[in-house]
């Protein structure tokens, strides 16, 4: 029984590893991925107000835009978000990390709050917005890769693998079988209202720019 269990684990890994290796190639190869030192993203769209809408059991939407800067090399991060709550409450907030030190700020009200002893997990979870960094994180923990099977996403076939990250989070990755690129990541968590729930981030488009595969859309 023990030998069979060990074989099942190895077989799952051996199916998952080629999926990840193909993705590395699709993003330009390992050397190009390792050369990423910082990433800047700007976005504009809508945000959904779960539990903060005008009525119960509905989800109001309001305009939302922001900017992320991830300094991968030095473990620094900065975000600036501009949004609105239903009913006319506007906000422009920021958050930054430099190692274990952090700060939040409210640009409208001119308030700054330092955050000491920021855990490394706070920075690590920010990489979810960048597909290439998710691929690298999975590679760095490749012994934890497991094959989950295939799935249809937006009418396209995908290979699905999973891995556990440094914080014990089990993350599933959906790779387009045609392009090899990452289309979605998801993980399971327990919500106070809905119970066991899946949190997903969908990468809805890519383009080629200056020799790099660049994300053009995201839904989560």
Image (cartoon, rainbow, N blue to C red):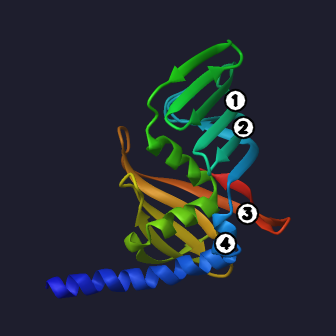
**In the foreground, 138 or 62:** 138
Quadrant (top left/top right/bottom left/bottom right) for the N terminus: bottom left
- Marks 1 and 2: CB-CB under 8 Å? yes
Q: Sequence order check: which comes first, mark 1 or mark 3?
A: 1
Residue 180 seen in this snapshot = no
Q: Nearer the viewer, mark 4 or mark 2?
A: 4
- In three-dimensional space, the C-alpha distance between marks 4 and 3, rounded to whole angstroms, equals 23 Å
- In three-dimensional space, the C-alpha distance between marks 3 and 2, rounded to whole angstroms, equals 18 Å
Left or right of 2? Residue 122 is right
**In the foreground, 149 or 125:** 125
Element at badge 4?
helix
The residue tagged 1 is 83
Q: Is residue 219 above or below residue 16?
A: above
Q: Position of residue 126 (x, y in %)?
A: 56, 47
Q: Give the number of the disc on residue 66.
A: 2
- In three-dimensional space, the C-alpha distance between marks 1 and 4, rounded to whole angstroms, equals 38 Å
Q: Nearer the viewer, mark 3 or mark 2?
A: 2
Q: Residues within 10 Å of mark 2 (few under 14, many from 20)?
A: some
The residue tagged 3 is 205
């Amino acid at each position: 029984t023990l030998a069979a269990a060990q074989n099942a684990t190895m077989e799952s890994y051996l199916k998952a590893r080629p999926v990840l290796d193909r993705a590395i190639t699709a993003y330009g190869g390992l050397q190009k991925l390792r050369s990423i030192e910082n990433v800047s993203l700007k976005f504009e769209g809508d945000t959904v107000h779960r539990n903060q809408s005008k009525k119960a059991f509905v989800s109001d939407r309001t305009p939302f835009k922001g900017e992320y800067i991830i300094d991968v090399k030095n473990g620094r991060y900065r975000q600036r978000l501009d949004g609105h709550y239903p009913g006319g409450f506007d906000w422009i907030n920021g958050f930054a990390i430099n190692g274990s030190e952090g700060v939040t700020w409210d640009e409208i009200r001119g308030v700054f709050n330092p955050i000491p002893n920021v855990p490394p997990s706070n920075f690590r979870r920010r990489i979810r917005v960048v597909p290439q960094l998710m691929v690298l994180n999975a590679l760095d923990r490749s012994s934890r890769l497991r094959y989950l099977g295939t799935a249809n996403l937006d009418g396209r076939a995908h290979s699905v693998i999973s891995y556990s990250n440094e914080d014990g989070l089990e993350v599933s990755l959906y790779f387009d079988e045609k392009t090899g690129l990452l289309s979605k990541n998801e993980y399971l968590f327990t919500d106070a209202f809905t119970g066991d729930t899946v949190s997903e981030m969908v990468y809805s488009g890519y383009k080629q720019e200056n020799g790099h595969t660049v994300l053009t859309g995201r839904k989560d």
